[in-house]
Image: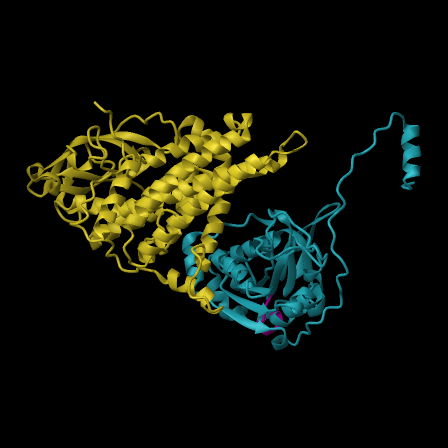
Amino acid sequence: MAGCFFSKLGRVIVRPWHSAFPGVHRGPSRSSSIEIALDNTTAKGSFYAPLQTFTEEETMMKETVAKFAQERIAPLVHKMDEQSQMDESIISGLFEQGLMGIEIPEKYGGSESTFFSSLLVIEELAKVDPSVAVVCDIQNTLINTLLMKCGTEEQKTKYLPRLAKDMVGSFCLSEVDSGSDAFSLKTTAVKHKDYYVINGSKMWISNADYAGIFLVMANANPSSGYRGITCFIVDKDTEGLHVGKKENKLGIRASSTCPVNFENVKVPESNILGQLGHGYKYAIEMLNGGRIGIAGQMLGLAQGCFDSTIPYLKQRMQFGKRIYDFQGMQHQISQIATQLEAARLLTYNAARLKEAGRSFIKEACMAKYYTSEVAAITSAKCIEWMGGVGFTKDYPIEKYYRDCKIGSIYEGTSNIQLNTIAKLIDQEF
Amino acid sequence: WCRCGAEVGAVAGRDEGRGGEMAAPLRVMVAVKRVIDYAVKIRVKPDKTGVVTDGVKHSMNPFCEIAVEEAVRMKEKKQAAEVIAVSCGPVQCQETIRTALAMGVDRGIHVEVSGADYEGLGPLQVSKVIAALAKKEKIDLVIMGKQAIDDDCNQTGQMTAALLDWPQGTFVSEVSLAEGGLTVTREVDGGLETIKVQVPAVLTSDLRLNEPRYATLPNIMKAKKKRIDKLSLGDLGVGAAGKLETLSVEEPPTRTAGVKVETTEELVQKLREIGHI
């Protein structure tokens, strides 16, 4: 068998049934960021703000998260990677800083900020540790988004405050036999009176070790194919739910990835998120946005790697000059920096498009695909530039190299992204 | 003793559960300065008139952060009634004030000074501004950083106290409310000195006073709604003219290699040669 197509560690790569689904229809929520961004430059007569224009809040968030990451996360990165275990203090730190409920409205205890802010937070965290960034990304772009979009008022009141305050969520979609081909999932949900019984096995589920709730995609009506897929909210303590042993991974090792088994797990009907049989729709829509979050993670990874390398190059002397001064090196560095800038603009623009309520799927796919490639190239080059020290675990560079590989795999493999882009281009002509 | 002595009776009701604290909650003002970020590599401008500030990352002076943190903690302990953050400088100072707001300060005052006036702004003018504002806002306690990391003047706090004729507690590493005022521990060359200070007073914070909090995301969003008043030097009757003129700014000389000597006699001889003895 061609192995498990492990998609985004528990998230799905979907065949884009794009004709059935309109593009973004989420209106500008708190898109004042765009207007304010424009505001900053209209005074000088220019109507078009550079993509790296941030509102004051966004700038403050970037700085505070950068500081938090440097002071509280950086010292633990090496240990967490070795032991493949995230330190408790980091997860509680993320909650304390309000980073796990970025878009959740204030009335549910969240930070009531924008999608772009989430992106910036994820990027800053990824500069220091991509594993921590992915925890934050999943919580904000998948779990919280799903609940806010599809939850009933009761579900929102029950879960959102806890998600903002101290509870991590996990998203269960991928299985042993369904990665990119997500809709062929085999987990079933059989109805009995007013509850459902879930049976099945999920693979590659991120955050599983410390999650308090699981959003489980199960098929409530296998005979209607993917139109039976329904999203269920399952509490961790529900009888029959077993979190399996953590995977021993190449990269983002501090992020826990486990199989999750469901053995006659009873879930009340009131725990269906959204509508019965609409799970596939929610998955796709949510992933369009989640894609940009991952692009942000890869962007931060590449930038963090690059930022750690350049000072060394300016300091190391060979043949009587800094290795930075060799033209061969300079050309390579400039090329990498250019690609990094391009990746950044793609990502920021996709996020701004989404916030503006405009069509953004193609741009999001491009951003995710391109940033994962750039992250891979950047980290590979950085190791070369650092020479021998780049190859040792004493320096943080080799970790970036290992961490970046997942970027082209999860949240839609690069091939799937390219398929989607091509289909959308097809529609344009 | 306490200026708010007249109001103690009225606010006594609020003091239940706080044990034997006598003073009514204080009105606190914190001065914050926008400086080049401590991690930035400083470069001197080619014309030697100063350092490069354009496009360079700026942030709140670390000692000012400590001052803000102390004020916010006092507010949390209900020892402070209102905390106001003040900054003098160009429009970008509002970012610094917003950071203070995001840490928990109630409102801000931005005294806008830009261009040439800003180049000549020094501790004397700033202390006049703070003194004027302290009177205007009926402040009981002014807290500021002991010095700014760009000029290392270590003068503003002391000058402010002198202008207001208030007692001062400088290089503070610990502060607590006491009968009639504050008990303040100062870090001095010989060790620690503990003094009693009546309010109203000026305190300047030293490194070990506290560890400033991060501005959490919810607080950053809340800070958007807090108000920042804008004033000019003229509004406070402070003249902009500085009495100091910067003649030149240069980088420190690059370290040259030292010289190794074999004997003490050689050492003494070398020291005589360079004129050190």
Res B203 quadrant in image = bottom right
Above or below for B18 versus A221: below
Residue B74, percent from left and from top: 53, 57
Chain B colour as displayed? cyan
| In magenta segment, residue B137 | yes
Above or below for B136 versus A75: below
User: Relative to B147, is A173 on the left or the right?
Assistant: left
The quadrant of the image that shows the N terminus of chain A is top left
User: Relative to A270, is B68 on the left or the right?
Assistant: right
Name the residue: 52% across, 71% down: B229
Name the residue: 32% across, 26% down: A247
What is the span of residues highlighted in magenta in the rendered image?
B134-140
Residue A164, percent from left and from top: 34, 48
Asked whether A91 or A377 is in front, the reply is A377
Viewer can see residue A98: no
Chain letter, colour yellow: A
Residue B183, percent from left and from top: 64, 55
| In magenta segment, residue A396 | no
Viewer can see residue A351: yes
In the rendered image, the residue lying farthest to the top is: A1
Asked whether A179 or A310 is in front, the reply is A310
Asked whether A237 or B272 is in front, the reply is B272
User: Relative to B266, is A303 on the left or the right?
Assistant: left
Above or below for A55 versus A410: below
Residue A325, percent from left and from top: 61, 37
User: Relative to B21, is B193 on the left or the right?
Assistant: right
Res A320 quadrant in image = top right
